[in-house]
Image (tube, rainbow, N blue to C red):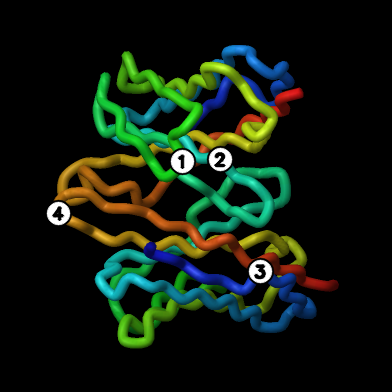
Amino acid sequence: DVKVTQSSRYLVKRTGEKVFLECVQDMDHENMFWYRQDPGLGLRLIYFSYDVKMKEKGDIPEGYSVSREKKERFSLILESASTNQTSMYLCASSIGQGEFKWSNEKLFFGSGTQLSVL
Amino acid sequence: QKEVEQNSGPLSVPEGAIASLNCTYSDRGSQSFFWYRQYSGKSPELIMSIYSNGDKEDGRFTAQLNKASQYVSLLIRDSQPSDSATYLCAVISYGGSQGNLIFGKGTKLSVKP
C-alpha cells in the first residue's frame, strides 16, 4: 500500500513563527501536493510538484512556499504564520506516469496536520 | 471558474437503505470523475473512479456518470453505519498535458442503525 506520512498530527505555533510541514511518500510517486481543508470551504490546493526541484502554485499559494529536494519528500513552509492559516493541512501524492504524468487524479493522502496558529 | 457542486447534507438514511449522493460540475470538457470518502478526523480515501457515461459497480457502490447533464452520482446499496462519512466528488479537466483536479465541498452521510 502507498504510504504518505506527515511528520506531525497536531501543531501549535505562534503568530510570526516560521513553520515547516513535512511529507514523505514511499511509493516513488512523481506528483506531490499540499492542500488545506477548512469547514465550509472544502479542499483547496496550495502548491504541487511534478518533479524534484519543481513547484507550481495552486489556488491559494499566498503566504506559503514549498521545497522538493528529493522525490519522496515535499515540504510546506509558512514563512510567517498568521491566525488565518489555522487549518488542517493534507499532503497527497499520485503516480503521475505515462498518460497521466501531469494529472493529479487518484490521490493518496497523508493523515493530515491540524495546525493552530495563536 | 470551474466548479463542482454537492449538497452538503447531512443526508440521513436508515441501515439497509440505498444512499444516493449527487454531484454536478460546470466544465463540459471534464473527463475523469472520482468519489472520495472521508471519515470524521481522517483524510480522504479514493473509493470510485469513472471515465465514461453509464454505471460502474464495485461491491455495494455504484458510480453513475451522465456527461450530457454534467452529473455524477454515487449509490450505496445496503447502507451500513460504517458508511457514515463525508463523500467528496472530484472532477478533472485536462488542458494540454496538465490536469486540474477540483473537489466539491462534500456531502455528509449518516446511516442510522
- At label 4, which amino acid type do we have? Gly
Q: Position of residue A44 (x, y in %)?
A: 50, 47
- At label 3, which amino acid type do we have? Ser
Q: How many marks?
A: 4
Question: Vertically, is A1 above or below B5?
Answer: above
For mark 4, give the secondary structure: loop
Q: Mark 2 vs mark 3: same chain?
A: no
**Answer yes or no: do the residues labelled 1 and 2 have beta carbons within 8 Å?**
yes
> What's the residue at 61%, 21% (across, down)?
A81
Q: Mark 4 vs mark 1: same chain?
A: no
Question: Vertically, is A5 above or below B79?
Answer: above
Q: Quadrant of the C terminus of chain B?
A: bottom right
> What's the residue at 42%, 57% (across, down)?
B102
Q: Mark 4 vs mark 2: same chain?
A: no
- At label 2, which amino acid type do we have? Arg
Residue behind mark 2: A36
**Frontmost residue, A65 versus A25:** A65
Cα–Cα gap, marks 3 and 1: 23 Å
Q: Position of residue A64 (x, y in %)?
A: 48, 26
- At label 1, which amino acid type do we have? Ile
Cα–Cα gap, marks 4 and 2: 26 Å
Q: Quadrant of the N terminus of chain B?
A: bottom left
| Figure quadrant of residue A31 | top left
Q: Answer whether residue B62 is visible to the viewer in this image.
A: no
| Figure quadrant of residue B2 | bottom left
> What's the residue at 38%, 19% (across, down)?
A67
Residue behind mark 1: A60
What's the mark number on residue B8?
3
Q: In the displayed structure, does residue A32 sit left or right of residue A24?
A: left
Chain hosting mark 1: A
Chain hosting mark 4: B
